[in-house]
Image (cartoon, rainbow, N blue to C red):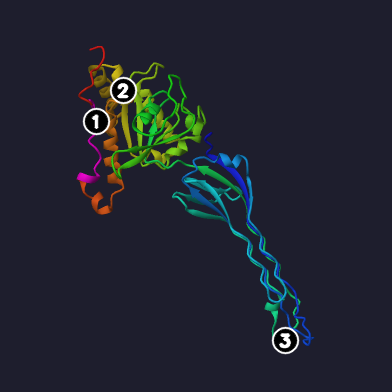
């Protein structure tokens, strides 16, 4: 199924039913009083989050939704039935905006969460409700009000704990394939990942997190270059970002250029992303010698003034990936720990910077 992360839909809540004008007419009761009933309320429209849906593609086929209107009131004080509420299933992580006003209506972040997007009309009043000591035969009634009508913009922001960033062919897809249940396309040409992918990383019972493979970012992505900003938005909800850097690039870019490009695009897209916790992952270490790797890391840290954690891995050969996932799990547990635990530096502290340069004792560098 093709990944669709934006959609525009029209919603029209049900109208309220009209009140009734009626008078009691029975044998031997020639002057019966008013008995017109009220109308029914119009149905509301809700969006409902569903974990079984992972794309907004269904809204390409149906873009207009209308809830049932309330029935009109009837004689003998009979009230019209209310319209049935309409629930529209959407993926978890959907953000909803009103196009005309620009108002952010809300977000759906958990399974079965509902969000009211259009309120049904109020029922009309029958003439029985207007009866008084001075108005014994009222002919007044009120029509029901119209239901809300809105044009909504739906935007799907992936819910992931960790997001993978990097230039095309940095090895993000290989990494997520190696450590999770996701199976993105892997090839030796740019932009093999055209849509975001989510993978669940399991490290034991009740110990897991979601890893997102974000399509490759290039210089100018925040302004729409390459795959543009449509995928940069997917990293706004992640708790931690991994910069995946190719230590043996074949396209002329250096690790310094790769890291600087990503950092600049993050800052250009959203200044708050510059404050989000980020780790550096040097990938494809099986293509360089140990000495070359040391020099690359030292030069990269010196030129970019990087102060965060640094890991060295080979996603293709599965070297160092286990240590990286364990460190991520520990850090996420610390981030999500209760406040009392987070104050303990042994629990909540960041991993020591520049660790795991040689993550596996079994690794033998090439050309040495």
Q: Are marks 1 and 3 in contact (CB under 8 Å)?
A: no
Q: Which residues are magenta?
A: 346-359
Image quarter hosting the C terminus: top left
Residue at 38%, 26% (x, y): give it: 174
Please report whichever mark, 3 or 2, sits nearer to the chain's N-terminal start.
Answer: 3
The quadrant in which residue 279 appears is: top left
Q: Residue 317, labelled with which disc? A: 2
The residue sitting at the front extreme is 27
Q: Is residue 5 magenta?
A: no
Residue at 47%, 38% (x, y): give it: 233
Look at discs 1 and 2 and give the one toward the viewer: 2
Element at label 2:
loop
Distance CA(mark 1)–CA(mark 3): 88 Å
Read off the residue under disc 1: 354
Q: Nearer the viewer, residue 151 or 194?
A: 194
Q: Is residue 293 above or below residue 177?
A: above
Distance CA(mark 3)–CA(mark 2): 91 Å
């Amino acid at each position: 199924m093709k990944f669709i992360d934006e959609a525009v839909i029209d919603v029209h809540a049900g109208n309220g039913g009209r009140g009734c004008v009626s008078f009691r007419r029975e044998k031997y009761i020639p002057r019966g009083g008013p008995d017109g009933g009220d109308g029914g309320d119009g149905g509301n429209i809700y969006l409902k989050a569903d974990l079984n849906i992972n794309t907004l593609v269904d809204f390409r086929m149906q873009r207009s939704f209308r809830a049932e209107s309330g029935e009109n009131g009837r004689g003998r004080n009979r009230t019209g039935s209310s319209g049935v509420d309409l629930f529209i299933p959407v993926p978890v992580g959907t953000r909803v905006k009103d196009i005309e006003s620009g108002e952010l209506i809300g977000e759906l972040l958990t399974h079965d969460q509902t969000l009211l997007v259009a309120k049904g009309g109020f029922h009309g009043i029958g003439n029985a409700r207007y009866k008084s000591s001075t108005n014994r035969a009222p002919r007044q009634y009120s029509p029901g009000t119209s239901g809300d009508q809105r044009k909504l913009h739906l935007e799907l922001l992936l819910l992931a704990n960790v997001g993978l960033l990097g230039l095309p062919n940095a090895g993000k897809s290989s990494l997520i394939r190696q450590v999770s249940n996701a199976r993105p396309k892997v090839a030796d040409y740019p932009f093999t990942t055209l849509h975001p992918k989510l993978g669940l990383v399991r490290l034991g019972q009740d110990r897991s997190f979601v890893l997102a493979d974000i399509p490759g970012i290039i210089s100018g992505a925040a302004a729409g270059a390459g795959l543009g900003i449509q995928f940069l938005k997917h990293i706004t909800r992640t708790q931690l970002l991994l910069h995946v850097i190719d230590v043996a690039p074949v396209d002329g870019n250096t690790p310094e250029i790769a890291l600087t490009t990503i950092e600049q695009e993050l800052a250009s897209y959203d200044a708050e992303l510059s404050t989000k916790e980020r780790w550096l992952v040097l990938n494809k270490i099986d293509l360089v010698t140990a000495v070359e790797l040391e020099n690359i890391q030292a030069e990269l840290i010196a030129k970019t003034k990087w102060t965060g954690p640094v890991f060295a891995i080979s996603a293709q050969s599965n070297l160092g990936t286990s240590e990286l996932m364990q460190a991520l799990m520990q850090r996420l547990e610390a981030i999500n720990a209760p406040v009392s635990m987070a104050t303990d530096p042994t629990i909540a502290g960041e991993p020591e910077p520049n660790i795991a340069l040689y993550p596996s004792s079994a690794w033998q560098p090439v050309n040495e």
